[in-house]
Image (spheres, rainbow, N blue to C red):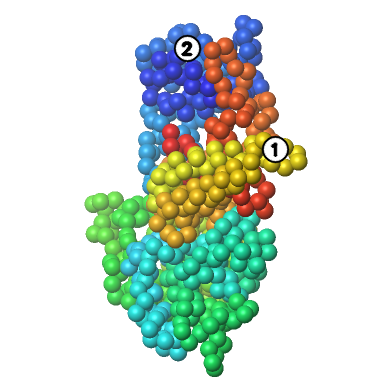
Amino acid sequence: MLSSCRNLYFLTPSLRESRLSARKVYRLLLQAIGSARMAHHDGRDSADFTRGISLQDIGCDDSNPSRSDLTKLLTGLDISEKGLSALNLQLGGEADDHDGPSGLKTHSSRVFVNRSLNMNTIKYVGFDMDYTLAIYKSPIYEQTSYDLIMKRLVEIGYPKELLDIEYDPSFPQRGLFFDKEYGNLLKLDMYGNILLCQHGFSDVDQAVIRQCYPNKFVSPAESRYFGMNTLFNLPEVYIQACLVNYYDTHADFKKLKSGTGVESEDLILLYSSIFQDIRMAVDYIHIEGNLKQKTIENLGLYIAKDERLPRLLKEIRDSKRKVFLITNSGWHYTDAVMEYLFDFPHGPERGSEHRPWRSYFDYIVVDAKKPLFFETGTALRQVDTKTGALKMGKFKGTVREGESVWAGGSSDSFCQLSGARGKEILFVGDHIFGDILRSKKRQGWRTFLVVPELNEEIRDWQSAQASFSRLKILEYSLSRMCRTPGGPDRDAPEKDIEKIRTEIKKTAGDMDRCHGSRFGSLFRSGSRQSYFAMQAMRYADLYAESFINLIHYPPRYLFRAPHQLMPHEQFLPSVSEPKASPGVRTISEDSPLRIAQSASTYHDEDDEDSDETAQNSPHLSTRTAN
């Protein structure tokens, strides 16, 4: 199919010169040729027909094709104008129908789609505050948090030498799991298989991994494993590694035979105890400590702001939608941060009058205690905005939109308060568990995940394309050697098979090293997607580097997800390549190129020698390398 379409593209000057990309022509013709409505023309099959067609054949201007010319072309292929509109074809740009409005060139401006979302059905748009509306500057904010946590640990009895350890922002990554029993940091794939295992600052040997984790598999839902899914966890990840490394290498301590901690002459210190102390220190600096006070005292140092924020919220409200804020932060901190985010000399537009930040929101909920908010929740109480005190009892009365601030409550009580229903709500947040997963599973809200790391991930992914292609070819070669029913190909020496397996692991490591973190990409390791990627694809309808990217899309935009085929569906005659035309070279089924182009190739998930490949995330689609 791809060969035929490329052949058409290069043989038809009108298409080649119409500013449509080859990949876009491919998609256009894929819809046409694959259609069951496609009839035989003059006894020719679909491949012969497409190979010879041109705009001149149907009476169109070959030098300057218009939208109507393309409509005639599609009509000749039995696709209606309505079908053309559905494809969102634009002659003026190369952005495809999954990437957003025509002319949206940069990844940093795009919203990526996991599940189609018609914005016309959304009546309420909600936002989290921390790391969503308020983006904390990295690494200065993590450095400050790290210093305060370490100071608190020393205050409760840990050695003062810990204060001499400098924070390394290149080490931590969110999406990891901490094993409280063995003190390991784990990066998991989408099924729970271990991709990487780190103990302190050392890689764990494969034999040790198999001893601690049979089949190299864990169940992330077990209480033994603590998931670090938010950017607030980054300093915590590094401190966990620091403390484990400190006690494992200290001359006065030796490891317990069970591998669950260390001991000295008069002390046993379990990794689970270290974890609990770190957790308590983290909670202390956020709730009782002075992290928030330090932030308020120098908001410009710690928080980035965007003058487009007022305009975006105004546009949302102008489209007859309600806007609300739900944050875990208290009222005084929320008020200070939001006041800063809207602190511009103008209003939504330059030259317009400045407006207080609360005027942009219909409902404001603080101290929400997510993810509990999406479950049983707490009592919903009004906040006295002058003192920050909570009014006694549950609220009963008339809701004055934009005037009342609420504390606590639950998603159920909020829906009763606002009149909203599940799928009418789009909620934007950064916390994969607290904001996205729970709101989706418990209430059916539509979800938008903010991934501040996304631009860097895309940049690194583009750098890793050569390694990724090589990885696919190596996997293909290995599968050829192991095709015989009785095991490896008898003609393939075992040493050759082992050589390819070693090369696969090396190439996967090369891909990981394209990323700045010790743990590689946030979304994958080699060709295997991470547990974080699985959660993002499963629970986030939309995702982007910033919520502000919504400003590039019309208020009633239809975000359409690309069609995804299961492996058995990819090779059905209706979606596979049509019969090759004479002189047109096709890609053989066994070709490494076909393996590399396959949207979804699956291996046995327990086979550590094969690098499992899952459906690419939208932002990692190979079309970005067109």
The number of numbered discs placed on residues in the rendered structure image is: 2
Is the C terminus in the top left, top right, bottom left or bottom right quadrant?
top left
Q: Which residue is mark 1?
A: 490
User: In the depicted view, which residue is nearer to us: 548 or 224?
Assistant: 224
Compared to 365, does 543 lie above or below?
above
- Residue drawn at (32%, 61%), measured in percent from left and top? 304
| Residue 478 appears anywhere in the view | yes
Query: Looking at the image, which residue sits at the far right?
Result: 486
- Residue drawn at (35%, 63%), measured in percent from left and top? 138
Query: Looking at the image, which residue sits at the far bottom?
Result: 266
Q: What residue type is disc 2 on?
A: Ser
Q: Would you call the spot at circle 1 few (<14 residues within 10 Å), some (14-19), or many (20 or more)?
A: few
Q: Secondary structure at mark 1?
A: loop
Q: Earlier in the sequence, mark 2 or mark 1?
A: 2
| Residue 382 appears anywhere in the view | no
Tell me if label 2 and label 1 are in contact, CB under 8 Å: no
Q: What residue type is disc 1 on?
A: Arg
Q: Which residue is mark 2?
A: 54
- Residue drawn at (52%, 80%), measured in percent from left and top? 274
Q: Would you call the spot at circle 2 few (<14 residues within 10 Å), some (14-19), or many (20 or more)?
A: some
Residue 55's x, y, as percent? 46, 12
User: In the depicted view, which residue is nearer to us: 415 or 225?
Assistant: 225
Q: Nearer the viewer, mark 2 or mark 1?
A: 1
Compared to 19, does 545 lie above or below?
below
